Image (spheres, rainbow, N blue to C red):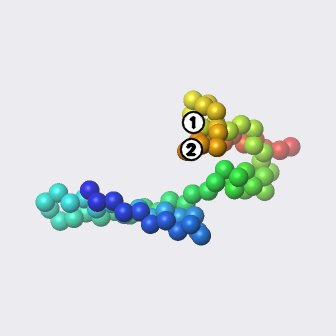
Amino acid sequence: MLDTMMVDRAQQLMVATHTIVDGGPPETTQHVIRYAFPLAIDLLAELSGLKLVERWAGWHQQPYTAISQRHVSVHERVN
């Protein structure tokens, strides 16, 4: 498999291309991922009437720190 990744930081996009070469005709698939940082998600949530309740570094409620590579954010509706 040959993988390539293009990152467009201005639009917060990652475009991944996967090509499988196994003796037959190469098969290529592509997918686009838009990423957002936790503070941007919090702002979007707030603009939608939600507030942040908790944030963890994973599904097992590990502490979220500056070096966490992912997050689980829990928001609730503001009355």
Residue 63 vs 67, above or below: the answer is above
Left or right side of 15 for 52: right
Q: Residue at x 59, y 70 (%)?
A: 10
Q: Amino acid at mark 1?
A: Gly
Q: Residue at x 57, y 57 (%)?
A: 35
**Extreme residue in the front direction:** 67
The answer to whether residue 27 of the structure is visible from this angle is yes
Mark 2 lies on a secondary structure that is loop
> Callout 2: 10 Å neighbours few (<14), some, many (20+)?
few
Between 12 and 74, the one nearer to me in the picture: 12
Q: Residue at x 55, y 44 (%)?
A: 69
Residue 49 vs 5, above or below: the answer is above
> Callout 1: 10 Å neighbours few (<14), some, many (20+)?
some
Q: Amino acid at mark 2?
A: Arg
Between discs 1 and 2, the one toward the N terminus: 1
* Discs 1, 2 touching: Cβ within 8 Å: yes
User: Horizontal and vertical percent for residue 57?
Assistant: 60, 38
The answer to whether residue 72 of the structure is visible from this angle is no
Q: Label 1 belongs to which residue?
A: 58
The answer to which image quadrant residue 3 occupies is: bottom left
Between 15 and 67, the one nearer to me in the picture: 67
User: Horizontal and vertical percent for residue 25?
Assistant: 17, 65
User: Horizontal and vertical percent for residue 39?
Assistant: 71, 52
Q: Label 2 belongs to which residue?
A: 70
Residue 19 marker: none
Left or right side of 34 for 17: left
How far apart are the two marked residues, 1 and 2, measured between alpha carbons?
A: 7 Å
